Amino acid sequence: MTHKKIDLLKELSRSPRALPRRIWLRQSLCAGAALVLPSSPFLALARAYSQSPNTNPPPTPAASPLVINPPPQATSSAATHYRFTPKEDAFLEEIQRTTFQFFWDSADPVSGLIKDRSLARQQDARNVASIAATGFGLTALSIAAERNWQPRDAILARVLTTLRFAADKLAHEHGFFYHFLKMDTGERVFKSEVSNIDTSIFLCGALTCRAYFANEEITKLVTALYDRIDWNWFLQGHPPDSPTLSMGWTPERSFIKSRWDSYSELMMLYLLGMGANTQPLPPACWDAWNRPHFEFNGIRYIGAQAPLFAHQYSHAWFDFRGRHDKYADYFTNSAIATEVHKIWCLEMSHQFPDYTEDLWGITASDSQKGYTGWGGPPLIGHPDGSVIPCAAAGSLPFLPQETIAVLQTIREKYSSQTWTTYGFVDAFNPLTNWASPDVIGIDAGITIVMAENARTGFVWQHFMSNPEIHRAMEKAQFQKNS
């Protein structure tokens, strides 16, 4: 490892995620490969598809889409005839309700901003919020209102507090918010960037609230927040004939050179921009980012050199089930990527014997050496046998039976280490008996939202009813699968 990487890791361990998440990942990649693939009916289907004549990487934007019809075990209860058993559903309810308590307790009473991270067993004195955690929190408030976890009037008041502060008092640049903020004042901290992806997560949460609560003031606030965003501002400096967005902006250094130019969690960003009522992104942006085909022992899928969350985040709100654009069926693609990730973890069981059929999953998380971006395939970072609960929870809609088995194993066998006031800790290592003392907002967020989508499709249903989202899907030329 170079001195530069060592210094970077030391800096991050002192101040977790002080750099933009995606920039950090790009700077800390470590290439690797997994080779042996156990048998699996779903993977056999994926392999057969990947070897068919029309699955080569598309030579032009107009190439045939990567579309397959997955078997039931590869998709969610909301997407197929699979239904969680009463015991499984009660377990997911417990996970969601306990995880929601983090968002309820971690919101500043004045601003409504959600703490970036907290001790898992109790609140602490840390006062740094993240705009992304706040977006997940808004979505969680909608779920909580539907499930009566708190009085509806109290939840509605919390939503309004957050949206009023964001609209009237929170500093922004061309409508985009800073990544990390002081909870009570909204002041920028860590010299963090103006982040379009984290602002997009906030906006997804706000749009979920607008659709669900159907409240006049919420509608006005969310619409004003959306309409003031100048999506084209981040196009500055884009390569000729490739309109991609910069990953961020700081007042000290202007636009970040790295761009949203390859498959990742970026789909929500481009779709929100294309569907906007004012200053929308041109439809050409949808064709401008790359969709690289990865291969795992003969199985091809669109992937990224990034942790598993890259296949999850946009799906938290955008319902890609049963539809495709000219390139891919992204829901099926994420199901394939999740299954491949599981098998990849099992391939490491000779090194980390805790990894089994019912215990696997690595994504960006805390570790014994600080916050780290790890996962695969291809190998990213340095896995050490740790298990990250939100890796499985965030993939519940894609592989419900297999991921809920992981969560049940964690709850039943490692409860003393992993189960706390706010649900699962961020990460733990059965081999060393280490467990993170914290819950991280974005990891708790993907857990509660994807669990709800797997159970009922509630978030998908309401978010997708927004007219801007309909417009975006049309501009991206999504069609129903035949």
Image (cartoon, helix red, strand yellow):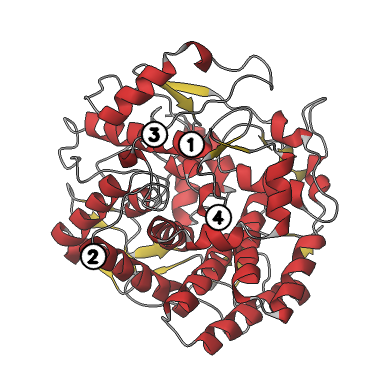
Question: Where is mark 1, residue-wise?
Answer: 306
| Marks 2,4: beta carbons within 8 A | no
| Marks 3,4: beta carbons within 8 A | no
Q: CA distance from mark 2 to mark 1?
A: 35 Å
Q: Which is more N-terminal, label 4 or label 2?
A: 2
Q: Few, some or many C-alpha atoms within 10 Å of disc 2 (few <14, some 14-19, many ≥20)? A: few
Question: Where is mark 3, residue-wise?
Answer: 70
Type of amino acid under label 2: Pro
Q: Can you say whether 293 is above or below 320 in the image?
A: above
Q: Which is more N-terminal, label 3 or label 2?
A: 3
Q: CA distance from mark 3 to mark 4?
A: 21 Å
Nearest to the observer: residue 348 or residue 223: 223
Q: Which is more N-terminal, label 4 or label 3?
A: 3
Q: Which is more N-terminal, label 1 or label 2?
A: 2
Question: Where is mark 2, residue-wise?
Answer: 86
Q: Position of residue 162 (x, y in %)?
A: 64, 76
Q: CA distance from mark 3 to mark 1?
A: 24 Å
Residue at figure coordinates x 44%, y 40% from the top left = 307
Q: Residue furthest right?
A: 279
For the residue labelled by badge 4, is the local secondary structure a helix, a strand or a loop?
loop
| Marks 2,3: beta carbons within 8 A | no
Label drawn at residue 347: none
Residue at figure coordinates x 46%, y 55% from the top left = 14
| Marks 4,1: beta carbons within 8 A | no
Residue at figure coordinates x 19%, y 40% from the top left = 357
Q: Can you say whether 233 is above or below 412 in the image?
A: above
